[in-house]
Image (cartoon, helix red, strand yellow):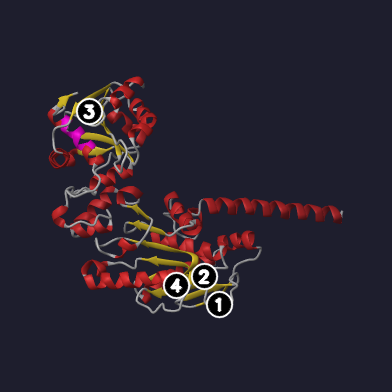
Amino acid sequence: MKKKAANTTRSRNKSRKEALKLAVKDLLKHPEKIGIRVGFKDMTRLHGKWIREIVFGKTDYTLQAHRGSYKSSSLAVGIALIMVLDPTHNIIFLRKADNDVAEMLRMVVKILRSQIMNDISNVMNSVPIEIVSESMDQVSTNLYKTAMGAPQLLGLGIKSSITGKHAHYVITDDICNIQDYQSAAERDHTKLQYDELQNIRNRGGRIINLGTPWHKKDVFRKMPNIHKYDCYTTGLISPAELAKLRKSMDPRLFAANYELKLIAASELVFTEPPQFVDMPEEDAYWLINGGDAHIDAAFGGQDYTALTIGKMDRETGIIYLYGKLWHKGVDRLLPQIVEKLKYFKCWRTVCESNADRGFLKQRLFEAGVFAETYHETQNKKIKILTHLRRSWPNIRFIPGTDPAYIRQIVEYTEFAEHDDAPDSAATMCRFFNTFHWEARRG
């Protein structure tokens, strides 16, 4: 009987271990669940994506995200995971000022002391995690074994002396702030300090940057591999909240903090935020079902291919738009474009004949899509400033519209490097505003 009971106990323990391993595997795939468990209730899959890049990325990484996007909370989870999953390497964490550092270290310590991190350590390291030293600027755990004498996690202000210090992970968070916006001297000093970080990163190590850009000549010019998430991309702030924020601050500050646009007030074209249809995607579908489409096609080079599908409510004057944007040539995108055109049952698709002499029209016909071409005669900039800007208050974007498409429009200036999405949207608005294509049909 005793032998049978012992076997049963071993079997149960083995089952528990297997279940715990599976749970930890799922948590590492979806680390936003860790954040939710330790108190960051608003974390989403997007934050899980950020955390995975911080923890498992192989190259230097820069995350630019708007204010209130929980990027620092994501970083706290990421740092705690690094300390558990890669305890042979140390971390140097930098913020603008020394007193800002303690806040992040407190968050990391709280996460490390959670049951969920203990479970992860038991599975990954076969021992529970314990904090063996802790202060306002450094933290070490029992997992950390090194002969260097440096703490596992060291926090510093960006203006601190970093000479002689070394780390595998060098992480900056908001080392650029409103001081850099206001002062050229501050911007230059921050950039000089950032250059020094190259000397403290160990061979094979990484530099990870998080923050919000403030000025065209700030330190972000030096940061590599930038991934941008503005207030329209994340979906974390409602249109009503954005409207309140916009009214409460200088337009340039709103553009920098929430739209990640670094432009002078005189360059602003679309000063009001984009408006979205407030209904589920499947219901909004009917607002543009059977509408028109326009393709701004790229044929190689650095241009984008933009697809705009739209319909105008003649009674209200509201223009409903759906947009997609790809950094690819149109020849590689035809199956995806045709799928969208057929899904929305577009009765007519229009594209320029200027560049391809009817190639795209023919390919669309072969795919069963009714297409027309036109020869563009209007200056692109004039078209955007006239038709898209005039229609902007009446445009409602359909849920599912590509965030990159929206971003290229809201970031548009007269000196923009890329303007394919605003050009396509402007062409569609011109059609709705004039009831015909203002160009000679091809």
How crowded pointer 2 is (Cα within 10 Å; few <14, some 14-19, many 20+) is rated as many
Of residues 326 and 410, the one nearer the viewer is 326
Residue 333 seen in the figure: no
Question: Mark 3, residues whose alpha carbon is within 10 Å: few (<14), some, or many (≥20)?
Answer: some
> Which residue in the protein does label 1 denote?
148
Residue 46 versus residue 374 in the image, above or below: below
> Sequence-wise, which precedes: disc 3 or disc 4?
4
Foreground residue among 321 and 63: 63
Residue identified by numbered label 4: 200
Residue beneath disc 3: 353
Per the rendered image, the range of residues in magenta is 424-432
The kind of secondary structure element at disc 2 is: loop
Residue 425 drawn in magenta: yes
Q: Tell me the kind of residue under disc 3.
A: Ser
For numbered disc 3, what is the local secondary structure? loop
Q: Where is residue 131 in the image (x, y as percent from the top left)?
A: 56, 73
Q: Are marks 3 and 4 in contact (CB under 8 Å)?
A: no
Q: Which mark is residue 263?
A: none
Q: Which amino acid does label 2 sit on?
A: Asn
Compared to 358, does 43 lie above or below? below
Query: Which mark, by number, is residue 90?
Result: 2
Magenta stretch, main secondary structure, is helix
Q: Is residue 188 left or right of residue 141?
A: left
Q: Nearer the viewer, residue 354 or 273?
A: 354
At a point 18% along the width and 41% down the height, the residue shown is 392
- State left or right for residue 109 relative to residue 1: left
